[in-house]
Amino acid sequence: MKRRLLSIVLMLTIGVFSYSGLNAQESDKTKKVDLGPKYGKDSIRCVMNISLYREFYKQWKQSKYKNCAIDDAIKPWRWVFLNCPRGTQNTYVDGVKIMKYLIKNEKNNAVKDKYIDTLMMVYDQRIKYYSKKEGYILGRQGVDIFGLRTKDFEKAYNIFKKSVEIQGNESAGPVLVYYFRSTIKMAKASLIDIATIVKTFDRICEIIDYNIKKSKSLGKSTANWENTKGNIELGFEPYATCENLIGIYQKKFDENPDNIELLKKITKILDKKDCNDDQLFFDATLKLYELEPTCASAYLIGKMYLKQENYIEAIKYLPEGTKLEDTEDVADCYILLAESYRSFKNYPKSRSYALKALEVRPDEGSPLIIIGDMYAASANDCGDNELTKKAAYWAAVDKYYKAKKIDPSLEGIANSRISSYSAHFPKIETIFFENLNVGDTYKVECWINETTTIRAAK
């Protein structure tokens, strides 16, 4: 009963003020405000009430926020909030906890709404008197208004936007997640366009990538940032169509084709979303390489030419991609080089790159499939009689078996090839005619130059 009465008193004395949100903060910024003395007009009473509410608050905290000491903390806390707002920043840190406690436990929606108003006032007043942390405070305020008043998503969006503008790379992960969610809500309400979603997504990803890189350099876990990025990418997915992305970025490219940062964004997002068939990706990639030749841009150009089956041009650029830091990209680059040289029937060169890919990514079975396919394609050219013209199939099937062993995802592909090429093994009579036996080892000559096991067609 006592807590209930104190809650009502708090609501009547503070909650009667209407929450003006971001506009109030901006008006405070446009004029100089006399903040008054640190401990207000009655410094003795201010210090006394700070000490009083803090003592009760500490007792409440020590009980893991369960005992009734909060009832005794509310009244002196309220007095400090109203009469000496500069006395201590704890007034606002503790105030958020107090207000959230009251909001959570209040059953009356009208009273709860007043408590939410007061919570917003706590944030606003903290910004007014402790503005050095404005960006951080706005981020927390945005998260609370987005969660407590879902209908006020526009206010939350504007608060988040300002917070991220101030905090930049120091923005917290949850703030970025809710910022993007509020952005999506704004788009669904037709208050912003798709271009704004993409712009916001770009900025948020820049911040996340910065923090992932920073965490790695410090030897810290990147799990939280990776999860944050995954969450945001999931929300962006419905809007990340090639049509939308190209429609937005084509205009930007036409207006500023020499902007390196823009070119990096265009090539990165179009490649990630598999929109690299469009002329925009081709033009932006070549332009980026012209302005800033790097291994990354060379790799993209190589992939682009390979997709167009222009293997001669692809081979000019792909080797630079093998110098990239990301081992996944390096492995992919080796595989692309293997495919390119296979197209020219330069099988030894293709095999060497396939094996390099396998070294970088030993659980990847596709390089072995490539090698097996080249062995099978060489069979007729690597022999001069019924047995030697079929020996290469033994070596090919060996590769397929190994591929599915290290990479179960390729089992279906491998089994299909095993079945097909096993039928091309020499007949048992041919093996006996050459004075050989099933199960013996056999050296396949030609460029293959591998030892295998003799098997007969079934």
Image (cartoon, grey):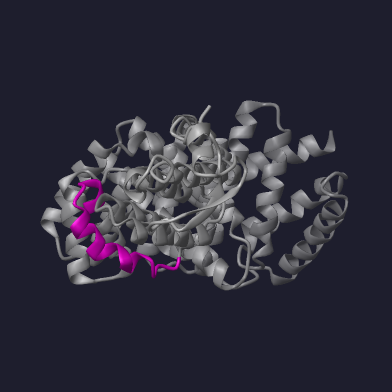
Q: Position of residue 410 (x, y in %)?
A: 51, 38
Is residue 35 in view from this perspective? Answer: no
- 312, 375: nearer the viewer: 375
Check the picture and name the quadrant holding the N terminus.
top right
Location of residue 52 by image quarter: bottom right
* Residue at position x 46%, y 30% in the image: 423
**Prevailing secondary structure of the magenta residues:** helix
Q: How many marks?
A: 0
User: On the picture, is 130 further left or further right than 23?
Assistant: right
Is residue 311 in view from this perspective? Answer: yes
- Residue 139 lies, with reference to residue 16, above or below; the image says below
Q: Position of residue 420 (x, y in %)?
A: 44, 30
- Residue 13 lies, with reference to residue 135, above or below; the image says above
* Residue at position x 87%, y 55% in the image: 62
* Residue at position x 43%, y 46% in the image: 392
User: On the picture, is 371 further left or further right than 276?
Assistant: right
Which residue, as the protein is rendered here, is positioned at the far left?
Answer: 254
User: On the picture, is 1 further left or further right than 420?
Assistant: right
Location of residue 302 by image quarter: bottom left
Q: Position of residue 295 (x, y in %)?
A: 32, 68
Q: Which residues are magenta?
A: 305-325
Residue 28 forms part of the magenta stretch = no
- Residue 68 lies, with reference to residue 411, above or below; the image says below
Q: Position of residue 285 (x, y in %)?
A: 22, 58
User: On the picture, is 233 further left or further right than 442?
Assistant: left
Residue 312 forms part of the magenta stretch = yes
- 443, 268: nearer the viewer: 443
- 89, 237: nearer the viewer: 237
* Residue at position x 51%, y 31% in the image: 457
